[in-house]
Image: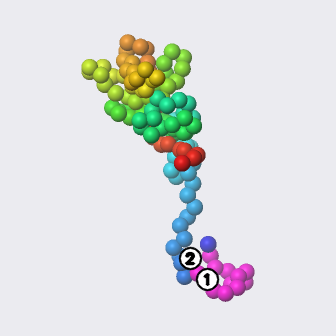
Amino acid sequence: MTYRGDRTSGFASPASQHVEQSLDLIQDVLSLQQPSRYPVRIEGDGLVERGIHTGDILIVDAAKPATLGCVVIASLEDDFKACEYTLQKGQPGISFLTASGRQFLSLEENNVSIWAVACGLVRATV
């Protein structure tokens, strides 16, 4: 913001040189302009242990490779599921909470594919 004496009264703030630029969440923080990034709204509490709750919005990247322990969106029987990418007995798979406890599904044995990797979280309420 620049000081224009013809439109103000008084004097310019000495802090005017230290004003930060506005923050653009879409471009600067979440990078949603990238074609491989998508917002995904979460339904269910399968990742509540990771601090991800119903109504949260995950920012996912379909081009990012999955690493052990990361949160992913997996394609499972014509449905998408937010879960954790993990290993069990040397087999890569997905893990999530159900009403009966933690469930693990092997990628190969259950025809599961990783669609995208979570890289951000947006929560409307705290």
The tally of labels here is 2
Q: Is residue 5 magenta?
A: yes
Q: Residues within 10 Å of mark 1 (few under 14, many from 20)?
A: few
Query: Quick one: which residue is furthest to the right in this view?
Result: 7
Q: Could you tell me if the residues under marks 2 and 1 are in contact, i.e. CB atoms within 8 Å?
A: yes
Q: In screen coordinates, is 89 left or right of 82? A: left
Under mark 1, the amino acid is Ala
Q: Quadrant of residue 95?
A: top left
Q: Where is residue 126 shown, x and y percent of the image?
A: 54, 48
Q: Where is residue 63 shown, x and y percent of the image?
A: 45, 33
Identify whether 18 is placed above or below 23: below
Under mark 2, the amino acid is Ser
Q: Quadrant of residue 6?
A: bottom right
Q: Where is residue 98 shown, x and y percent of the image?
A: 45, 23
Secondary structure beneath disc 2? helix
Q: Which residue is mark 2?
A: 16
Towards the viewer: 54 or 13: 54
Residue 55 visible here: yes
Secondary structure beneath disc 1? loop
Q: Which mark is residue 12?
A: 1
Q: Residues within 10 Å of mark 2 (few under 14, many from 20)?
A: few
Query: Quick one: which residue is furthest to the front in this view?
Result: 100
- Residue at 58 percent of width and 46 percent of height: 124
Towards the viewer: 51 or 4: 51
Query: Quick one: which residue is furthest to the top in this view?
Result: 109
The stretch of residues the image draws in magenta is: 2-13
